[in-house]
Amino acid sequence: QVQLVESGGGLVQPGGSLSLSCAASGRILNIHSWDWYRQAPGKERELVATITGGDAITYGDSVKGRSNITRDAAKNTGYLHMKNLEAEDTAVYHCHANIDVGLVATIPYWGQGTQVTVSS
């Protein structure tokens, strides 16, 4: 059984920064990609950033230029750093990973979500 456990988040002042991490554990052969999504109340889920096993990176338009997604393959952990936070960044942030667990295809897994609130 694979689990993704997120940490970080909480209350951040406008203009501040946040660091989120997502640790995968269990029967993992390889993590093909990491994604971070967020969902604010009353809004649809939004892709924040993606990083592949080859380190190809994509950012959502709303966070470009102030976000950094990284991964540590040895630790099976993904990271998201954001700066210059705004109230509009308030949301529940979820990590997602496509993981090779020894089956024909990779399996998508989700973290439990962590609340980020940007407020003074």
Image: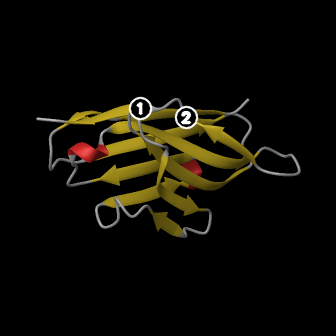
Amino acid type, callout 1? Thr
How much space separates mark 2 and mark 1, taking CA atoms? 9 Å
Q: Secondary structure at mark 2?
A: loop
Specify the quadrant of the image occupied by residue 96. top right
Q: Secondary structure at mark 1?
A: strand
Q: Residue furthest left?
A: 120
Q: Residue furthest right?
A: 104
Residue labelled with disc 1:
114
Q: Is residue 120 above or below residue 74?
A: above
In the figure, is residue 120 to the left or right of 20? Answer: left
Residue at (74% x, 48% y) in the render? 29
- Residue 88, position in %: x, y? 27, 46
Quarter holding the C terminus is top left
Q: Which mark is residue 111?
A: 2
Q: Is residue 82 above or below residue 20?
A: below
Q: Nearer the viewer, residue 48 or 53?
A: 48
Residue at (30% x, 39% y) in the render? 90
Residue at (34% x, 59% y) in the render? 63
Q: Which mark is residue 15?
A: none
